[in-house]
Image (cartoon, rainbow, N blue to C red):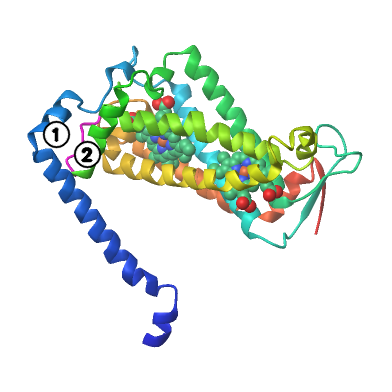
């Protein structure tokens, strides 16, 4: 590539973006450190160190079901996002699926015909949703909900304090085993109790076949509104997952992974090993779930045609 070509290519934008982001990062770190030097801010951080005692669980540690829910959720959402992006980007799908015309997805006697990507998305959504329902129920029949639901207004000053501490690069001590910091509480709450329900109500509104049944409420909840919101909700999930996994890996990876993947609070390698196994399973499924295999599975409940 000549210099003139490079200047026209989209990579040229990086020449500006990378230094701009680096400068912004350095400015944020410097400002946060300057803030922490001010006596008032230092007092504030001492008063609100970052963890709201109201979010401390009575039973420290994680139950096994929570670890299973979390790893299954990560597995399903990978394919929810993959199939969602395929729906959006593939303009001429390789195959279509027509449901054997029975049951819920029947539209005025006509069988529903959708692309194989739609079929995959809605199928995986169903598994993700079932996993989520079990998660909700178990959260509230145990005391685990206490960890991820804000329970006093103090969560906000604690979250601000945590943000300043992260930005100054002097990170708060990790005590996720008994109490998440307030930023974690807010992020987990927003993901579990706001983003996931929004993805579901906007997604269900668009399910081919089901969409027709919502016709009576088209005026108050038009399908186009659901279509408009569904994509930005995915962008939120992508942002959350990126920051979440980045922080898990940079704030004491071994210990954090032990919490969620091996249910222990020590320095063993088990958490990392199980995390590695879960990544391998995802990679194998990614390769295995190619169109020919999806076609085979989809054929069980309908006809697949090109
Ligand atoms: C595969 C990559 C992932 C890794 C390595 C990971 C790791 C972790 C770890 C270590 C914790 C506990 C944090 C601590 O003890 O301080 C945690 C909690 C959590 N993660 Fe993830 N996570 C991943 C993907 C996801 C995804 C995809 C979601 C949701 C979209 C998610 C949502 C959550 C939630 C809601 C919690 C709090 C759970 C509770 O205590 O009820 N994670 N994660
Ligand atoms: C129960 C949950 C869900 C259901 C029932 C559902 C359903 C649907 C349906 C029917 C479509 C096709 C829309 C159309 O024909 O235009 C769609 C598109 C899509 N879905 Fe979902 N969805 C769910 C959850 C999710 C989640 C959790 C994500 C991402 C985290 C996601 C990401 C996407 C994306 C990116 C598209 C393409 C949107 C576009 O073309 O702008 N979905 N979803």
Main secondary structure type of the part rendered in magenta: loop
- Which range is magenta? 169-174
Residue matched to label 2: 164
Q: Residue at x 32, y 72 (%)?
A: 15
Q: Nearer the viewer, residue 286 or 155?
A: 155
The image position of residue 285, as x and y in percent, is 57, 47
Q: How much space separates mark 1 and mark 2, taking CA atoms?
A: 9 Å
Whole-percent x and y of residue 181? Answer: 29, 29
User: In which of the image's four quarters is ligand 1 placed?
Assistant: top left
Which quadrant holds residue 160? Answer: top left
Residue matched to label 1: 41
Q: Where is residue 184 in the image (x, y as percent from the top left)?
A: 34, 32
Mark 1: few, some, or many residues within 10 Å (few <14, many ≥20)?
some
Residue 262's mark? Answer: none
Residues at badges 1 and 2 in contact (C-beta under 8 Å)?
yes
The relative height of residue 141 versus residue 20 in the rendered view (above or below) is: above
Foreground: disc 1 or disc 2: 1
Q: Residue at x 65, y 53 (%)?
A: 87
Residue 72 % position (x, y): 52, 34
Is 41 in front, or is 168? 41
- Magenta span has 173? yes
Taking the magenta stretch, the answer to whether it contains residue 127 is no
Instruction: Give the quadrant of residue 263.
Output: top left
Indicate the secondary structure of the residue bearing disc 1.
helix
Sequence order check, earlier mark of 1 and 2: 1
């Amino acid at each position: 590539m000549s210099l003139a070509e490079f200047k026209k290519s989209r990579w040229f934008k990086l020449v500006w973006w990378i230094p701009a982001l680096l400068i912004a990062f350095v400015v944020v770190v410097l400002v946060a450190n300057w803030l922490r030097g001010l006596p008032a801010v230092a007092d504030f951080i001492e008063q609100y160190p970052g963890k709201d005692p109201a979010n401390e669980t009575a039973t420290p540690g994680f139950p096994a079901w929570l670890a299973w829910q979390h790893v299954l959720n990560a597995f399903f959402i990978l394919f929810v996002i993959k199939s969602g992006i395929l729906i959006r980007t593939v303009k001429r799908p390789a195959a279509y699926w027509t449901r054997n015309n029975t049951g819920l997805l029947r539209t005025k006697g006509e069988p529903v015909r959708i692309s194989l990507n739609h079929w995959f998305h809605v199928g995986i959504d169903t598994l993700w949703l079932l996993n989520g329902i079990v998660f909700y129920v178990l959260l509230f029949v145990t005391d685990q909900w206490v960890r991820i639901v804000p329970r006093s207004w103090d969560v906000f000053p604690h979250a601000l304090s945590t943000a300043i501490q992260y930005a100054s690069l002097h990170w708060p001590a990790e005590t996720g085993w008994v109490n998440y910091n307030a930023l974690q509480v807010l992020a987990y709450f927003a993901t579990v109790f706001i983003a996931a329900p929004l993805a579901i109500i906007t997604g269900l509104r668009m399910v081919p076949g089901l969409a027709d049944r919502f016709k009576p409420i088209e005026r108050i909840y038009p399908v186009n509104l659901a279509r408009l919101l569904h994509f930005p909700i995915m962008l939120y999930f992508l942002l959350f997952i990126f920051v979440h996994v980045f922080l898990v890996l940079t704030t004491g990876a071994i210990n954090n992974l032990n919490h969620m993947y091996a249910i222990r609070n020590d320095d063993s390698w088990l958490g990392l090993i199980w995390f590695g196994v879960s990544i391998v399973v995802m990679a194998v499924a990614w390769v295995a779930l190619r169109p020919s295999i999806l076609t085979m599975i989809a054929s069980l409940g309908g006809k697949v045609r090109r």
